[in-house]
Amino acid sequence: MTTNNIIWHHATVTRQCRETLHRHKGAVLWFTGLSGSGKSTLAHAVEEQLYQLGCSTFVFDGDNVRHGLCNDLGFSEEDRKENIRRIGEMTNLFLQAGTIALTAFISPFRKDRERVRKLVGEKNFVEIYCRCPIHVCEKRDVKGLYRRARAGEIKDFTGISSPYEEPETPELTVESGEKTIEACVEKIVEMLVQRGVLTVETSEVVSAL
């Protein structure tokens, strides 16, 4: 595919303008971990807290995205790669809109997560590893996916028949198998204050938790 006739149009309303309007910085919060590790629950809980603080946010949930944008993809390694590529491009657009984009995807392969990091920029990418023992994930599995995967009914299931590559140097690791949702949310919001994503005073953030 040639892009010789495609020219990038530079908007007069910049990301900085949008961030000024939102009164916070744009960022990509990339939640990664095994199925059942609490990624979606935590991402939505963080979004709720940020909403209460007046932030502009959006959660890209793994299941929701596969209902539309990625409904043509399966779960082979190549399809997983393409799934994350598309999400990376989408989160980059939200980043340029000055929004805090939160994603909840297993995203099992380091190279795919690093590709998104490179796309959106090191300072904009916040990898949050939801660390949870697989036996805890299985206990939480209301869909019965682990049981079906162990029975051979589901192919390429992360943690059973397909590998999960743990982040080596994530911006933050939350012990989602041990800590409460509230404790994990507090840790993440505090980190966003420290990184300068949130421009409200730290005391306001802490008192809101």
Image: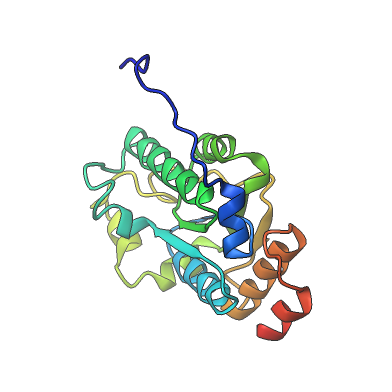
Please, which residue is most extreme toward the bottom here?
207
At 63% from the left edge and 67% from the top edge, which residue is drawn? Answer: 175
Query: Toward the viewer: 133 or 30?
Result: 30
Give x and y (percent) for residue 29.
56, 56
Please, which residue is most extreme toward the front here?
12
Q: Quick check: 170 above or below 175?
A: above
At 66% from the left edge and 69% from the top edge, which residue is drawn? Answer: 189
Find residue 82 and report its image quarter. top left
Is residue 27 visible in this depiction of the protein?
A: no
For the N terminus, the quadrant is top left
| 11 sits to left or right of 168 | left
For the C terminus, the quadrant is bottom right
At 26% from the left edge and 51% from the top edge, which residue is drawn? Answer: 154
Q: Quick check: 95 above or below 76?
A: below
Q: Quick check: 153 above or below 59?
A: above
Query: Toward the viewer: 151 or 15?
Result: 15
Give x and y (percent) for residue 120.
56, 40
At 59% from the left edge and 52% from the top edge, which residue is drawn? Answer: 17
